Image: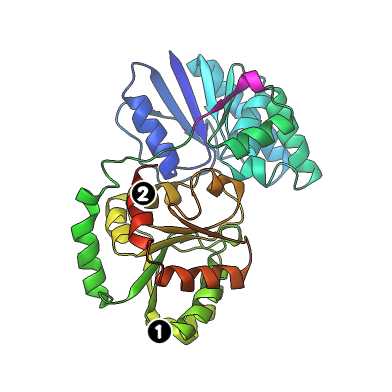
Amino acid sequence: MRVLYFTEKDSPHDQRFLRALADTNHQVYVLRQFPCHPTTPEGINDLSWPDNQPVWSNWHGWQIGIRYLADILEDIQPDLVHAGPVQGPALITALSGFHPLVTMSWGSDILLKARRSPWMQFATRVTLENTDIFLGDCQAVVNEAVQLGVPLEKVVRFPWGVDLNHFSPANGKLKGKALRKSLGWESNFVVLCNRSWAPIYGVDLLAEAFKGAVKENDQLRLLLIGDGPQADHIKQILAPVADKVNFQGWLVREDMPAAYYAADLFVSPSYCDGSSISLLEALACERPVLVSDIPGNLEWVLPGETGKVFKTGDIESLKTGLLQLVSDPQLTLYGRRSRML
């Protein structure tokens, strides 16, 4: 079978899907909507746009992109197209008229963007009306897709999941201990967050909560992994307590288990998520978690069993959660239970 995997760029999600597809007997092609420097697994055929990169910022550019996709489809004759997010590659495929279309949601495209504006409502409706199979990574996404008109019989719930061999005690404990020692934080309580520094992920909220919490408990330390458009804002918030924060930048996948095991607590302050890969990795690494109480998180986090939740967008609720977990006698037990979910 010939499969066209059509995505925006080259995320860790894409890489995992492509590695899995590379292990099959299918003939797989990958096309990316936007230019990037991809890491394509051996056995996957890279495609590029047949002419200059379409300009996706206006409708004329979209029309060109749709024609380009039609040429690609005519050339490779795929048996199916696997495309997402909903308002990007899946929409382009829907507008090209190709079937069968497997639309893969990326969480926020359904949970946040689908009703954001008349254009997004139109884009979502066109895509879903022309979707043959819809993949959602959690029940919250599935429920919303059904509310938006996808017949339940066309829906498949397909959590992203994580590599339990890579994100494991054997692969992270010793390196995590070494990282913690290198920071001089062996006797501190270390909080880790590796969400992107964009408004939807709430890292600025965590910065405010941590700044308040560390004034009440000087043993707190914050390990921030990542970067993003709010970098200057987040660093400005944390400037008064900068000596208690370490900015690691982005880490490659191979280094992430050590980062998780260097921490006592994982925090995800996101305003919107499906099944968060960062959260699943932290749970696999036996980390207690403190997360926003959005539906996607509540499918994985059992308050009082694997960690705690706080009121989404509430700085005081997050600050209180940090301070309570520092002295929670069940903290280690939360971590042990996390990997057994």
Residue 122, quarter of the rendered image? top right
Amino acid on which the number 2 mark rests in the picture? Arg
Rendered location of residue 52, percent (x, y): 55, 38
Q: Please tell me which residue lies in front, 125 or 136.
A: 136
Q: Report the disc number at residue 218.
A: 1
The answer to whether 180 is drawn above or below residue 96 in the figure is: below
Q: Describe the element under mark 1 as helix, strand or loop.
A: loop
- Range drawn in magenta: 152-158
Q: Please tell me which residue lies in front, 81 or 302.
A: 302
The answer to whether 314 is drawn above or below residue 126 in the figure is: below
Q: Nearer the viewer, mark 2 or mark 1?
A: 2
Q: Residue at x 51, y 54 (%)?
A: 303
Q: Residue at x 58, y 36 (%)?
A: 139
Rendered location of residue 162, percent (x, y): 37, 41
Q: Disc 2 to disc 1, how far (Cα)?
A: 28 Å
Which quarter of the figure is the N terminus placed in?
A: top left
Q: Residue at x 56, y 34 (%)?
A: 84
Amino acid on which the number 1 mark rests in the picture? Asp
Q: Describe the element under mark 2 as helix, strand or loop.
A: helix
